[in-house]
Amino acid sequence: MRWLISQFQKIPQRWRGIFGICLFGLVASLGAVGFQLVINWIYQFGFIRTSHSPHFLWISLGVISMGSLISGWLLSSFCPEAAGSGIPQLKLAFWKEFGHTPRRVAWVKFVAGALSIGGGQSLGREGPSVQIGGSLASTVAGWLGFAKQNKRAAAAAGAAAGLAAAFNAPLAGVAFVLEEILEDLNSRFLGAVLLAAVIGAFVVHAFVGPQPAFELPRIGEPTWRAYLLIPVVAAVAALVGVFFQRWCLQLRMATKKLHVVPRMLHPFIGGIITWGIGVAVFYTTGRLGVFSLGYEDLSAALNHRVVWQVAAVLCVAKLASTIICYGLGGCGGIFSPNLFFGGMCGVVIAGLSSYFFDLTDSGKLLLIVGGMSACLGAVVQAPVTAILIIFEMTHQFALIPGLMLAGLVSQAVARSLNHTNFYEEVLLQDGHAMEHIIPPRDLQSWQNLPASAIANFDPVTVERLEEKELAELLRRAPYRYFPVVENGKLKGILARTEIDEARAENRPAQLLPASTIRPKQTIRECQNVLIESVAGIVVLTDKPEGMPLAVLTLHDILRTQIAMSEREG
């Protein structure tokens, strides 16, 4: 590693950034490909090879139980932020921590995600691939000497390479990072994202092959009947996506408040319920699609080998299992399940339509892929990504007009029923409003934001000034100034240096006067108050001398201004 760092430092400054992006993309895509191969190996061993064995029931139960238990233990003991999809967590790290993520995130996500998804839980690999890629790139950037505040390019490049390698879809990887994580199609990180996605495509071609995720026969131009049915399929698939988002997040919220069962057992409960649903569907239909990614059954549906009645059963069972797995804290994404829901909706509507008029194989295929794109687009509300990922997973140009039509209907339905996408809802549940984290595009808009948008609503306050309490405060809190509260009212500001001096001189600590503003006052007004404050800290209160709600420092303002200038650049 020292040799690598020394060699990197010898590269001319103008080429160092390009070399770094190439290295970030390579490491991230290798991590994503390795993640995919491990998932496939575990799933083949635990489910595919044993599906015709008389011991399938007990082998599958053992695999999903052990995988869920180990995953739950890793997530609860080492890295809770590795639970779930990983995309919201990476987005939060990109904007709030300048792209920096702890080193433990990558290995916990890799192991827990592989055991969860390969072990049969109904989750996808795209979210973990994005988080693993972004985390690995961030770690490598740190090894190469990048400061914490300069890791955004690494995180974005790693995310794009990870998604490109996960689906063999570099265009979709670029579009998703720009649409969802950066929220800016003209971002200054566009070059880094493009280069990393290309490297991800090369890596997946080298280790997995250049073939698309789904092998389809060459299709002709769909008929007008299929185009008439596409809006119907898109609307139904979008409604399924909306239903999934609402119930999944409601269960997630309920699980966060559930303290009776230890957190490490939550994924285990989800795995056992999924196993029950999955084996019931398997012994009824002969299909394993409820478990893991479900790509074998989705591929069969695309090749017209699944009747609509079986598709309906698979859709309902997969929907219930994914809601349970994700809602109970499983480690995996939601791309693959939503592609599955939408595809099966297309099969069902194509099958029912056959009772009224004939559809060609090309028309049926268009309905299936249209449902896939519509369901995914409704949940992530990233229509360009939803279109590109289906195109790159099938390599069929004739599907593009139908996918675009499905995307329009899907967005109309989803945005009228859900105001935010799945990932932003997850962050809101965790107490992170993105409008408080992502800076606006111009200075005037930023200065007119309420001060509450960038304030810290979890301040460390002092209620007792006894020496023992103050000593404990210094031990657990690294801050320089602390609001002092007495009888529910703000009394003043206590400086860290004053605590030390008062303890050394054996005298009571003296308070500094507090500068206060109301939460709805603008950042422009807050700046003036902050300049005039004695302690360099402003306290947000509901009324003068009221209870402190939040604190705001010069560091908070500068960090947001830096983020805004980077976004403008």
Image (cartoon, rainbow, N blue to C red):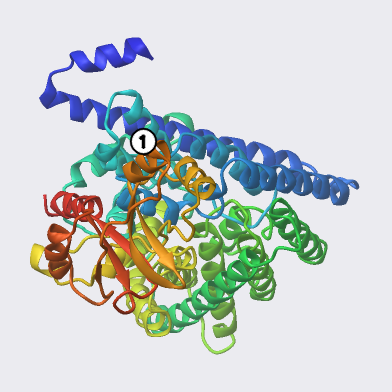
**Looking at the picture, does residue 309 appear above or below residue 159?**
below
Question: Does residue 501 lie above or below 60 as drawn?
Answer: above
Percent of width and height locating residue 237: 49, 76
Q: Which residue is mark 1?
A: 138
Left or right relative to 121: residue 199? left
Q: Position of residue 347 (x, y in %)?
A: 56, 72
In the depicted view, which residue is nearer to us: 331 or 528? Answer: 528
Q: Look at the image and tell me in which quarter the N terminus lies.
A: top left
Looking at the picture, tell me which residue is in the foreground, 170 or 114: 114
Q: Label 1, secondary structure: give it.
A: helix
Q: Position of residue 164 (x, y in %)?
A: 38, 44
Q: Is residue 568 visible?
A: yes
> Position of 283 compared to 497: left or right?
right
Residue shown at 30% from the left, 36% from the top = 148
Q: Quadrant of residue 37?
A: top right
536 versus 519 height, above or below: above
Residue displayed at 23% across by 25% down: 19
Question: Can residue 221 be seen in the rendering of this structure?
Answer: no
